[in-house]
Each structure stands twice: as structure tokens, then as C-alpha cells.
Image (cartoon, grey):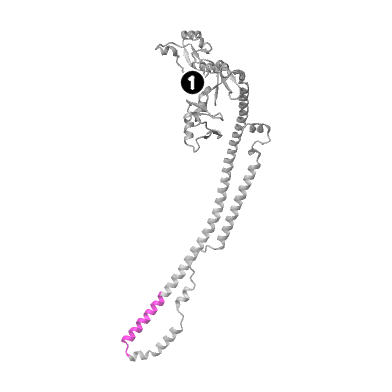
Amino acid sequence: MGTESSKDGNEIPNKEAFTCPLCHKIPSQPKMTPCMHIFCLECLEKEIEQKDKPDVLRCPVCKVQFMIPKEGVKSLKTNTTLEDILYLFKSQKPSVQNCGICLNNDEKTVAVSRCINCNDFICGKCTKTHQFIKTLNDHTLIPLTGDAKADTEQALEMLPKSIKYCGVHTNEALRYFCSSHGCNKPICRTCCIETHKGHNYDNLEKSINQDMNNIDKIIEISGRRKKMTEAEISKAKRIEDIIINSGQVAIGKVEAAMKVDMEIVERHYKAQLATIEKVTQESLKSNKTHTEKLEVEMDKENKTIHHLQVQKKYGHPVEIINLRKELSQKVLELDGSHFICSQISSGITVPKYNDNNRHKLELRNVEKMLMNTTEKNESFALKQASCNEELELPSKGNKQNEEIEATM
């Protein structure tokens, strides 16, 4: 909030609202950009140092681009009203104030009034002196109540009535406004006679009527924009809740569907594993039987070889010739028999997993179907969101919106 209520119900400035948008501190040298945003002079100078084009700056708040004066950002308008307000806040203290004039003479005297023009606290004696000095007759004095907040409120109310002095004739108050071409600035009485003789000028307070109307208009339009923005923020928060809740519901449904689908896939692959395990065990059993038969066959061949080698080495020719019939029969038997290895191993199955099996292709098709469904659901959700009246922005045809947009 930029204001707070005073005792009479009027709004008074809150110094926390005057912080610089860049450093977030109360500006000591408040400079105003052409877009009427206020920054510290030091912060603006730092901004320019970081830019490639030192003659152009984009407002850090509204992003409006403007040209930097040749003299630099220090030549931008100083918000003297803000300076005066910040000074009043700075001098606001809960304790009793002493007279600033007497303090210069090493005396401590309780102040009873405050001069808006001198920005100083004054005791009773100095107040009377202040009133009798001719050059100070037009100064505005306000009595102190002892309540620091109330005194500050009163001082703020008197700021528009305070005196601003001419930069050329320092003892002359700025009371007129010269509207002649090339001037357009407040002037004093001496300026009217000397440098602005023959120009068009009028009373300063009358000259600001148009400016005050513009201020009121900007405040009114900004007030409407503020209400519309608040409504949009409220709507955005409602939409955020809808998005979060809908997202949570959708996630729950997806997780449930995923669980079911994963169970189906898991059952499928577990069946594949069971089949492979069954084939593996059956093949191992067949291979074991095959191995046992081979070992029996090998033992038989070993015995035949051993027996005949002994017969060949140690047998008498008579004994060998007596075995002619048996040997001839054995040769015929071995030449005409099939080898047992090929007969047994032909029935063994080696377990294999084929990546190109039909079920793999079916799973790929299921995946494509799921992705298509996801895309359709997403498209449908977006379409529903765009058609939902709850999500629609205010119509651009609205007369109030057109008026506000025209002022941007």
C-alpha cells in the first residue's frame, strides 16, 4: 500500500512506498524518468554503465525507452515533492524537538513550531523573530502538538502552501507561470519585469488546473486498471487452483491406468520367462540323457579297443585266425550302423528369445495407440480450456477497456 489513513480519514503517504525499484531503498536523490517512475540517481547511473548505448535507457519498471539528456541522468527532473516528503519523515521523531536556530548557538530550547519553508523547528522566541523579519513574512509556520505523527501529517498538508524560490532571484517566490513559447516554467515577480517582459504569464495556482485535471484522470484510469488487474489476478488464482486440482486428478488416473497396463505387460513377460524356463529344463534333461547314453557308448568303444589291442599285441596267430568270423562280422556291423550322437542330439531344443516376435510388434502398436490417445486428450483439454468461459479474458470490445487501452 502506498498510503495510510490519518486521524481525519484522509490518506497520507507511506514512506515505504517510495523505495527505489532497483535498490529497494529510500532514494536520497530521487530522479524521475519521462514515464514518471522514480529511481535513485546512483542506481540510474549504474544502469547506464551496464548498457551498450549510454544515450538510451529502458525504464526498469515499465520498459519504456527514452533518451538520456546530454548532461546525463543527473539532469533528469528531481522529484522535489518526494524530497520534501522524505525529509519530513526523516525529521519525524517521537522525542521533543529542539529549536534548530538555538542549537546553532549551542543552546537547547524546546521547539513550538515548524517552518515548512526553512524545514526547521523553531522555539517560541525564534518564532516571533521569524514572523517579524520582512523576507520571511511569507513563510508558513505550523504549531507543534507534541505528537510526532500528527505534526508530520500537518506538515504534509501544508507542503502545497510552502514557498519555492526562484533560482535566479533567490529571495523571490515563484508565483507565476510563463506559458510563452520556449519558456513554460514558473517565474518570480522580478522575472516578469526583467527576462519575461511581454510574455504570457498567469498566476501559478491557476495555471496548474489542467495539470491537476490530468492527474485526476490518470488516477481515475489507473484506479480502473488496478481493479481490472485485481480481478484478473483473482481469476488467475482460481485458474491455478483448477489447474492444480485437474492435474492431480489426471495424474491419479494415469497412474492407475499405468498400473493396470504394467500388470498386463508383466504377466506377458512372466509367461515368456516361464516358457523359456520350461524349455530350458526340458532341454537340459534331454541333454543329460543324451550325455549318459554317449558315456555308455564311449565305455563300450573303450572296452572294444582295449580288448582288440591286447589281442593284437599278445594274441597267438592261431587264436587270431580263430576269431576271423567274429572280426569280419564286427567290421560289417560297424560299417553299417548309425552313430548314436546324431540320433540323440536331434531332439534337444535350445531356448531362444526372438525380439521380432509378434507380441513385440503388438506392443509397439499399443504404444502408438497410447501416444495418439495422449495427443488427442491434450488437444481436447486445450480446446476445452479455450472455450471455458471461466478462462476467457475481458472482451476487447468493452468500452471501458478501449478507453483504458487508448491511454497506454
**Magenta-drawn stretch contains 298:** yes
Residue 373 left/right relative to 82 = right
Quadrant in the rendering for residue 301: bottom left
Give the residue displayed 54% in from the left and 25% down from the top. 2
**Residue found at x 59% / y 39%:** 242
Q: Is residue 49 above or below residue 145?
A: below
Give the vertical position of 169 relative to 372 (above or below). above
Of the 4 image quadrants, the one containing the C terminus is top right
Which residue is at a point 68% across and 32% down the rendered structure image?
399
Residue 106 in which image quadrant? top left
As drawn, 268 above or below 12: below
For the point 59% across and 58% down, which residue is it? 365
Quadrant of the rendered image containing residue 193: top right
Looking at the picture, how far across and down is residue 15, in whole percent?
51, 24
Where residue 361 appears, as percent x and y from the top left, is: 57, 60
Instruction: Reply above or below: 38 against 280.
Output: above
Residue 297 placed where, x, y %? 41, 77
Extreme-left residue of the structure: 314
Q: Is residue 98 visible?
A: no
Residue under label 1: 87
Question: How many discs mark residues in the rendered view?
Answer: 1
Q: Secondary structure at mark 1?
A: helix
| Pick the front one: 145 or 43 | 43
- Please tell me whether the stretch drawn in magenta is mainly helix, strand or loop: helix
Q: What's under tag 1, amino acid-wise?
A: Tyr
Q: Nearer the viewer, residue 15 or 195?
A: 195
Residue 82 located within the stretch drawn in magenta:
no
Q: Quadrant of the N terminus?
A: top right
The x, y position of residue 119, in whole percent, is 49, 16
Disc 1 residue crowd, few under 14, some 14–19, many 20+, Cα 10 Å: few
Q: Which residues are magenta?
A: 295-316
Using the rendered image of the protein, determine whether residue 30 is visible from the camera's viewpoint.
yes
